[in-house]
Image (cartoon, helix red, strand yellow):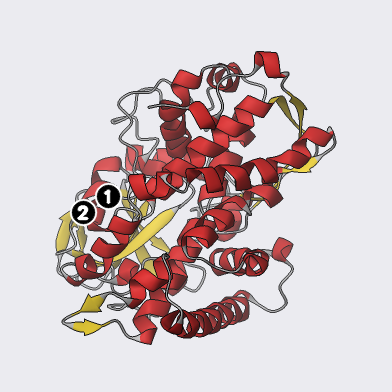
Amino acid sequence: MTSSPVRCPFQGGVPNLADPGLFRDGDPHAIWRHQRQTEPVSRQYTAEGLGFWSVSRYADVDLVLRDHEVFTSEQGTMLLLLGRGDPAGGRQMTVTDPPRHGELRDPVQRALRAKPIEARSEQMREAIVELLAPLADGGTYDLAAYMARVPMAVIGSIMALPRADWPRLAELSLATVAPADPALGWEGDAESVLNDAHRELFAYFVELVGHRHNHPGDDLVSLLLGMTRDGRPLTMGEIVSNCYGLLVGANATTGQVVLNTLADTMGTAALAEWAESPGLLFSGVEEALRWATPTLHFMRHARTDVKLGGRLIRAGDAVVVWLGSANRDEDVFTDPYTFDVRRRPNRHLTFGSGPHYCVGHSVARVALRLLFAELFTRYHDFAPAGPAVRLYSNIISGWTRMPITARVRPPAHRPLSSESQGR
């Protein structure tokens, strides 16, 4: 399946890459392509007049993410925090630089390795099959609504969160990455929605951590309670911050890989080939990750003056790298605007790069392999069933509504399910 950005991205003036509306109603890939070709490191401004450097080429994005000595994470990693700093800096794993970052990351990384996660695969598969079941009724199925529940089922099991809490936690997670999206139904402006969601999530985890302290188990929250830093146990603030980061990171991204991929491939030969070829499951998931790139950007701040892409970045300047642009860079990917389930190599940057490479990458990959395998095993002839609505966010590339229909695949014509998939 091939698509290409053909619209002029600069009608009406310089595009504002900080505008969430651009990612809902516009064509960011056209803008990124133009920037890669003409000004790969360019000065941009938010609607409030705050400046940042926009980085669009793969090599430069990779460099910024890898070089923590020049580009720090501790002042905030998202444009929402531009000019304000991140209160969790130095305490939460995602906004802590090495070497302290490694102290927080390593035990969590061990708990989220592929083998421990695959041991939970049957539990994950059962949850996925249950969520896909209504598609068999033959009516309209809102794929966005159900895909929002898949990652919550996965991370909820790993953190041993009460199942009754999953729907609200999924809503709160989405509000933190799209606080101005009217489709979410929150009252107030983006700032108040973001603050309300933060407060509710942090209050939830303070109570949960207090309870888990007295009733530890075999789960990720209990693991954080047993971790130490500088010879001392983690503080309540450190544990709660990391619970928050892990929950939001999982909930906001995994399901959007399925949505972004199907939005562009339904009815194409590329999707049909993948669905009929169990041997392409692994390479197809990697291509879906490249294609979808659910996390739009990461932000860093320069520690010192540095040259990047021929531009002088001053110490203290914010630098925003666009992962979706890097994953369509013509210098790295052959035919980058073609969805190719056989693509190898596929060195996408969807999970980032360097010390902050996504700690949950194994969880996401296992969940997506299970999800696509069950989807293709049980159903075929996926088709849109009404207008889809994109997420109003400059953080996550995704959807709030995607009605589809599908037909149940006859058992005699089913490819292998996730129960029998092998590498």
Image: 81 above or below 248: below
Picture residue at 54% right of the left edge, 61% below the top: 156
Amino acid on which the number 1 mark rests in the picture: Ser
Image coordinates for residue 180, horizontal then vertical, percent: 63, 68
Q: Is residue 84 visible?
A: yes
Q: Say if mark 2 contacts mark 1, CB within 8 Å.
A: yes
Instruction: For label 2, count other residues whose C-alpha is less than 10 Å away and answer few (under 14), some (14-19) or many (20+).
Output: some
Residue named by callout 2: 66
Query: Which residue is found at the position 50% from the left and 64% from the top?
Result: 248
Q: Which mark is residue 353?
A: 1
x, y percentage for residue 233? 26, 83
* Placement of the N terminus among the 4 image quadrants: top right
| Neighbourhood count class around disc 1 (C-alpha, 10 Å): few under 14, some 14–19, many 20 upward | some
Q: Is residue 419 left or right of residue 103?
A: right
Residue closer to the observer: 388 or 405: 405
Q: Is residue 190 left or right of residue 304?
A: right
Q: Earlier in the sequence, mark 2 or mark 1?
A: 2
Above-or-below relation of 109 to 255? below
Tag 1 secondary structure = loop
Residue 34 falls in image quadrant: top left
